Image (spheres, helix red, strand yellow):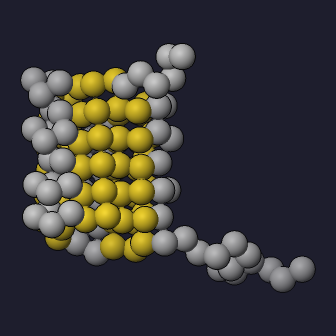
Amino acid sequence: MMSSSKNVLANDVEIKGSIKFSHDLIIDGKIEGEVHSDGSLTVGENALIKGEIKTRSVTIFGKVEGNITVQERCELKTNAVLVGDIAAGTLAIEEGATFMGQSQVGKRPDGAKLGAPKA
């Protein structure tokens, strides 16, 4: 099965522009731009991402400057630094992580969509 393979952007990679991917991606380099995916993103300990992240889930070991929107889980590891806001289904922050921003965690109950007409 190839679907379990992870794509890696090594720490000598620098990208300016948006990135889109489908499955799992590990970024250990520098990114300036948006990162969009239906998959999961791992931000390596050498990584610096400046820009918006919109993925299914994200695990951060490095540094992110920008807002994060994930459908499922956002995880900040011990030495992670996040300057930006989080919107996530679940949020886990390890001791030692730095988070400067606001967070919205959890999902609205089904059927409680705002402005939806009643049947």
- In the displayed structure, 27 sits above or below 100; it is above
Residue 16 visible to an observer of this rendering:
no
Q: Quadrant of residue 70?
A: bottom left
Looking at the figure, which quarter contains the N terminus? Answer: top right
Give the residue displayed 21% in from the left and 63% down from the top. Answer: 94
How far from the left and from the top, in percent, is residue 108? 59, 75
Give the image quarter of residue 41: top left
Left or right of 68 on screen, residue 50: left
Specify the quadrant that holds the C terminus.
bottom right
Query: Which residue lies at the image location 73% right of the left edge and 75% below the top edge?
Result: 111
Depth check: 105 or 94 in front?
Answer: 94
Q: Residue furthest top?
A: 1
Instruction: Pick out the residue farthest to the right.
Output: 119
Is residue 113 left or right of 87 when viewed as pictured? right
Relative placement, left or right, of 92 versus 87 is left
Q: Position of residue 26 (x, y in %)?
A: 28, 33
Name the residue nearer the viewer: 13 or 34: 13
Q: Position of residue 28 (x, y in %)?
A: 17, 33
Q: How many marks?
A: 0
Above or below for 111 versus 8: below
Q: Position of residue 34 (x, y in %)?
A: 32, 43
x 20%, y 55%: residue: 77
Q: Is residue 106 in view from this perspective?
A: yes
